[in-house]
Amino acid sequence: MTEASRASGDEVPEQVDPAGSDQTDRAAKVEADTVEAVVRQQLSKALGGRRGMAEAAVPTILFTVTWLTQRDLDLALEVSVGAALVLLAIRLVQRSTVQFVVNALFGIAIGWYFVHRSAASGGSEQDQALAYFLPGILYNGGYAVVLAFTCLIGWPLVGFMVGSITGDATAWHDDRQVVRLCSRLTWLLVAPCVLRVLIQAPVWLAGRSGSLDPDTAVAILGVSKIALGWPLQLAALGSMVWLLSRNRTPVAPGAAPA
């Protein structure tokens, strides 16, 4: 307390612990004082809202419809890429984030690579069309394994969302209440990935082996990719929001709930 403040008689706040002050400052930067608020903000950014999810779905819809109606794989790929590029141009003109369109383009590029590999190995056009959907199945399987692993070892991935906001990547792990909450939220992210694999992998295998008509398999995969995409993600998000609405877990470890 300075001499001026003593002379004026102004009330001076009590001193606070420097470490506690740092934690408060970091939380204030994002205007969120609970884990629930932090996670809601980060999930909203990660999903991109309705527009972001639509941008991810449109290229797949056009690929599936074009292939089933025209039986031209190159045309189907060109149409899906063209749609993604139009969406990208709109984003650039509006000067808004291009993250979700770029993600869609990246997914198409990976699908095209699998199609190319199938063609190089002598696969039929039906095999190549099926190959387009394989990366998504593998991605969901791998993503589910990684997320589940982070929960099993006690470092749930959602916890790092909290760390990215507070400025300390691992401080959240000192609070068991936060770890439990983040584990539950991470398991809710695992569920849609597992469901997609359980539904799509048998269809893909059946189409590849010939026990299911390849065109039918492509149609089922295309429809299921959309149906199990953003709608399922929204269902998972709804479950997470419900869970987040039940408690107010402080961002700063050791702080009292509000």
Image (cartoon, rainbow, N blue to C red):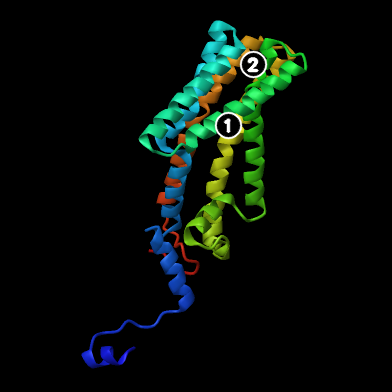
| Rendered residue at 49%/29% (across/down) | 56
The image quarter in which residue 192 lies: top right
Q: Are the residues flagged by discs 1 and 2 in contact, CB closer than 8 Å?
A: no
Does residue 243 appear to the left or right of 31 in the view shown? right
Q: Is residue 95 at all visible to an observer of this figure?
A: yes
The image quarter in which residue 108 lies: top right
Instruction: Indicate the position of residue 177 as horizontal and vertical percent values.
Output: 52, 60
In the picture, the disc for residue 39 is: none
Which secondary structure, mark 1?
A: helix
Q: Is residue 231 at all visible to an observer of this figure?
A: no
Q: Total of numbered circles in the picture? A: 2
Picture layout, residue 133 above or below residue 150? above
Q: Disc 1 to disc 2, how far (Cα)? A: 17 Å
Which three-letter amino acid code belongs to the residue tagged 2?
Ala
- Residue at the farthest right position: 121
Quadrant position of the C terminus in the picture = bottom left
Q: Which residue is mark 1?
A: 106
Q: In terms of depth relative to the viewer, which is nearer, 242 or 24?
A: 24
| Rendered residue at 40%/57% (across/down) | 30
Instruction: Indicate the position of residue 252 as horizontal and vertical percent values.
Output: 47, 66
Does residue 209 appear to the left or right of 233 in the view shown? right
Q: Nearer the viewer, mark 1 or mark 2?
A: 1
Which secondary structure, mark 2?
A: helix
Q: Which residue is mark 2?
A: 129
